[in-house]
Every structure is written in structure tokens, then in C-alpha cells.
Image (tube, helix red, strand yellow):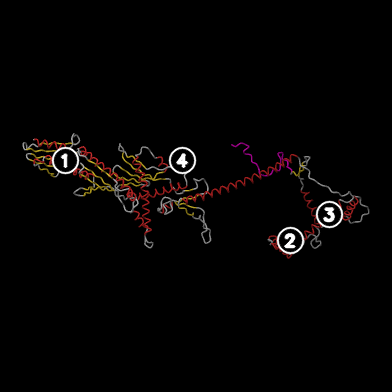
Amino acid sequence: MEPGWKQTKLSLERPYKNDNGEVIPVLYDITSDGILHYEHKETPTEVLGRNLQRIYEERGLEFFELLKDGSLQTGVLPSVDAADKREDETQDTAFDEESNHTMTKDELYKLKMEVMPQLYIALGEMTLARDLLSSILASSNGLSTALPSILHSIAAPEPQTQQPESLPPLSATVVTKPPSIVSVQAFNAQLAIGGKDEALRKAAHLFKSVATRMERGRLQNERYWVDALKIRRGNWGLVPAPLPPGSAIGKGADKTSKDFIISYGLEECLSSSFHHSAPPILRRSAIAHMSYGGSEEESLILPQRFNIRLRVSIGSPDASGNIVYSHNALEVSPEDHALSLDERLKDAQRAVIEQEIFSILVHEAGTFPTASARVSERLVLVDVTQGMELKFELVDAGIFSLGMSSTQNPVNQAKSDFIYHYLLTLLLRRHAYVKARRLGTDSSSSLSISSLDTSQANLPILQPVIDQLQYQIFCERIHSQLNVVKAALIAAGIPSTLRFNAVGEIGSELIKIPVDEEARPLSGVCTLRIDNRHNLRLTLASPSALTAHLSQATISISSMPQLCELLSDEVERFFLERICDVGRRICNDMGAVWFVDLNRCVGRWEGCVLNFQITFGHKFKIICIATRLSRTDPKHPVVDTYDSSNAEKSLIDWVQHVLGNALNE
């Protein structure tokens, strides 16, 4: 329930009774003595009598008895003639038309020439009357006494038998308004001063607000044009904004506009960093507007910008076998750093470019020939090789910047950064190729959009990245296998050197690879030199092409078992030939015969046959088996075995020792 004072309803009508129920009189005046003068309340009888008296005074005593023609007709009022009524209506209509008529300059001048002489005459008469009245008031008493007599005689022309009594002399009296009481004067003074002060304050506030608004508008306009010049100086696409809906577009209409829109997509010769054109759907979304109000950060409006970025991640297994992803780094400006217009446009442009790259990756991942891929709305996951995954995803910029961790693999993170920038370069090559095809084709030829799409498909951007990653893994596997062979040779006492150059191109050629229209694979060469005399040369090409250049042939290797077999054959052939050389050198005076028969080395002299056979164990461990048949016991050969993993001497020294034992028997 509301209290009683809240339920009181006040009327907006002026109160006419006080609290006692008495009628409140209307106050007319307050004298200097404090006497109140109220409005006299007239009765209906007094009002009627006063109105009748005015009729008799203004129209005469016989107003109700005389008719229009001067005759008296008892009880019947004269009828109004219809012609007179039409005449009166015509006069009223003419009068109304004259009152509504707007006078021209000539009519006003004519009216002025007619009225001015009469006004001058009236002015002269009033001046003469004033002078006469002044002379009468300034005359003597006798003359003053005679004047009322004359006036009385004029007012009463009937003859009088008695002499009129002398009237008091006529004199001038100056009437001044009595001063008001002190409180009223103070109130009037305060009212006047307060009203003037309030009026001055309102006027000052009005002028101040108008000046502030004008200054703010001037600063906003100045900032708008300064921003427009900055954007144009940055070589961004600044074009006039279209007219608002409903604007006049016909002939002679004002089609100008001072509003601008900025196209920050991949435009030809307009963007500050990129000089090719993006697909129409992306260029339509890459539009910014310039605003008048707000701060400098709000002077650029990006209505269709989504704060998402492209994150490139490389996953590789750790020591425990779990896949650990390392992604590229996102450049984030400090919180206290205010981005300029150019920086904001660059960030927005980079986001649009990343969306275009991701859309191309989605189309290419489905038809990728050398690796399997999984595609979703914001994720592309490619299984590059065994133990390596490449992931492209569109993530929020805030999550991207918060996702940086010190536990990432720095090598994979550097690879992710390289892949991200390499994709930008490949995208520019794709656009440059399309532009060259379009400009190089005659305008009369029918170059359809489908043909442009086909030409774009000839320059993929995912294939070179996957090829390079696969080539890197391929080179690492080849290098590790050759290192195993080298270590095994060194363990067997054979000096060996390995020179591995995965990328054989020079810097200028490497720069041309992502720019040229033709696909140019990376290539390298590796050389295994055994005992400073025998060379095994292999050439590599991305993604996984390996060629062995032997003295007798050139062989293309397509798998690691084939490479291992080739290496074992070459190393075995080298050892067998070296054993033959050692045998010939030691048994030269005995007429011995040494030769290589398939996978063994045979030495024969009088009373002895010696066979050497090479096998390979784990991690290319060299095992040599020597079988000796002597004349004394031909059915029980002597077998000696050499194992490089636990041998104290080299293989050649062991061979010499076996030969010495055979010769001493």
C-alpha cells in the first residue's frame, strides 16, 4: 500500500476557493499603504444595465423605436431585401479579397502618397492644439476664468437667465507614478537581474555548444581527410563510396560523394604489399569504411573482418611416442601500442590472404597424390610421411597468441614459420600466372573463367610444401643410412668419408624456384669415399628420387631396401677386390691365383685353397668368413671369422694374418 501523501492528486486547474470554501477574489493592485484592491464582483443585473446604458449612449435613446426608413411599425420588424443582402455579401467578399490581397511596391507607394499629406495635416492640427492649450494654461486668471465660461456656453446653448458662477482656474498638474515598496523594488530588481543573467547564461551556453560542435566537426573533417591522405599515400585501394539508396541518379543529379571505402584485398597495383587480384568473393568481403566520429582507433570500420588467422603446425613424435605439434609464431603488437591505419589495414589484409590460402588448401588436399589428407571446415590435416603431420587450421587470433609455449620444438617451429611465408610466395606466383595468362591472351579470344581456374590448378601451393617436407625426411633417411655404412667401414679399419649436400642449388637459383611457373625440384648429391680410392656417388631430387651413379651403370633407387642392397653389394665388391689385391701382393712369389667369384674371393696356390666371403649384420656390421682347404686334411676345412663389432684389428690386418697362417703351414 502506498502512503496517503502519494495518493494525493493535484489538479492543474487554477484554484478559485480557499481552504475555508470562500471564493478567492482577483487582486488588481496593492497601494503603497498596503491596501489591497480586488476586482469588483458584478451581478447579472448590473452587467445588463451597463450594457443597456452603453447602447443608449452610443446609439441614442430611440434606437429600439426607429426603423431603417425612419417610420415606426408596431410589432413587425422590416424584412431584409434579397438584393440588399446580395449587395452586402458582395461587399463582404470584396473586402475579404482585399484583405487577403498582397500589395505590390507600386500600390504601396501610391497608398503612401495618398496618406502622407493627410498625416501631415493631422500633425499640424495636433501641434496647433497643443500650442493653444499651452498658451491658455500659461495666461492670467481672468482669461482662465473666461475659457470655462465659453466652454460651458458651448456645451449649454440654451439661454440662461442667471449669470454662471465663476469656475476654478484651469491649471496643469504633473502626475507621477507612486514608487513601489522596498520589498517589491528589491523583488523586481532581483527578477530583472535573474532573468537577464539566465538569458545571458543560456545565450553563452548556446554559443559555447555551437562553437564546440563546430570545432569538433572541423577536427573530425580534418582528421577524415588526413586519414584519407595517409591511406592513399600507403597505396591502398581508396575509391568513392556508392550513393545511399534512394539517391537521385538521373541526368543532372549530384552524383558526388565525399565518403570513401578501402579495398584491402589482393588488388592489381593498389595494395601496398601485394599487386595481384584475389577471387571476387574475397575482394567483396575485404572492404573497409572511413567514419567521422570517434577516436583514431574508430576512424576505420571493418564490417566483414573475422578475427581469425591461419596457423601452420608440424607434428612429430617425442621420446614417449606422442605427437607434439609446433606451430608458427604470430606477431602480436603490445597492448599499449596504438595501431596506425596502415598497420590495421595490413593485419586485415593478411587475414584475407590467409583465408584465400586456406580455401585453396581445402581444394588441393582432396586430390593430393602423394599423401593422405583429412579436411574439415577449419582444419586440413596432411600425413606427410611416417612420423610427421602437417596441419593447417583457422583459429581465433586471441587463442593463437595465447597458444605460444616454450615446450614446442624450435626446429619444427622454424619450419612452420618458413611454410607460412612460403605459402604467401606461392599464392603470389599463382596470381601472377593467372594475370600473365589474362594479359597475354587476345581480347577477341574466348578465355572463360573455367580456363582460368584450370590454369590456376596448374600451379598448386600445397604440392611444393609437401614435396619439400618429404624431401627433407628422405634426405635424413639417406644420410642416416650412409652414416651407418661409414661407421661400419671405419669400425672395420677402412678410412671412409661422407660428403652429403642435400641442396645443391645456389642462392639465386633457390629464389627462382617459388617464382618460376615451371616446377623446379630441389636436388642434391652425396659421395661416399671408401679407403681414399673408391667413390660411391648418389644424386637426390625432391620429393624422393634417388639415383646411384656407378662405374658400370646408373641405377634409379625407389626404396630403402634397394638402397641397402646396393650399398652392401658395393661395399662387398670393394672388400673382395681389396682382399684380392692383398693376396696378390703377399703371394706374388708363389704363383698364386686370386679372383672374385660372385660373392666371394678365391685364392689358390700349390697345396692350399682360401675363400673369403663378406656378410653384413645389424647396423651394417661387417662379418668376414675365411675358409681354408689344405692338402694335409682336405675333408676338414679351417674356418676363421672376423666380426667388426668386437674385433681388435682391422679387416685388412685380419686378412693378412689369415694369409700368414695359410702360408706357414
CA distance separating discs 4 and 1: 69 Å
Q: CA distance from mark 4 to mark 2?
A: 80 Å
Q: Which residue is mark 3?
A: 131
Compare marks 2 and 1 and give the one earlier in the sequence: 2
Quarter of the image where the C terminus is located = top left
Q: Is residue 194 left or right of residue 577?
A: right
Q: Residue at x 83, y 55 (%)?
A: 129
Q: Amino acid at mark 3?
A: Asp
Which mark sits nearer the N-terminus, 2 or 3?
A: 2
Dividing the picture into quadrants, the one containing residue 155 is: bottom right
Mark number displayed over residue 335: 4
Majority secondary structure of magenta residues: loop
Q: Determine crowd level at label 4: few under 14, some 14-19, many 20+ residues with C-alpha closer than 10 A.
A: few
Question: Which of the labelled discs sits on residue 468, or is there none?
Answer: none
Few, some or many residues within 10 Å of mark 2 (<14, 14–19, 20+): few
Circles 4 and 1, Cβ within 8 Å, touching? The answer is no
Could you give the CA–CA distance between mark 3 and mark 4, rounded to whole angstroms?
A: 93 Å
Cα distance between the residues tagged 2 and 1: 142 Å
**Mark 4 or 2: the one toward you:** 4
Quickly name the residue at label 1: 614
Please, is residue 371 above or below residue 117 in the view? above
**Helix, strand or loop at disc 3?**
helix
Circle 2: residue type: Lys
Q: In the rendered structure, which disc, 3 or 4, sits on the residue that comes first in sequence?
A: 3
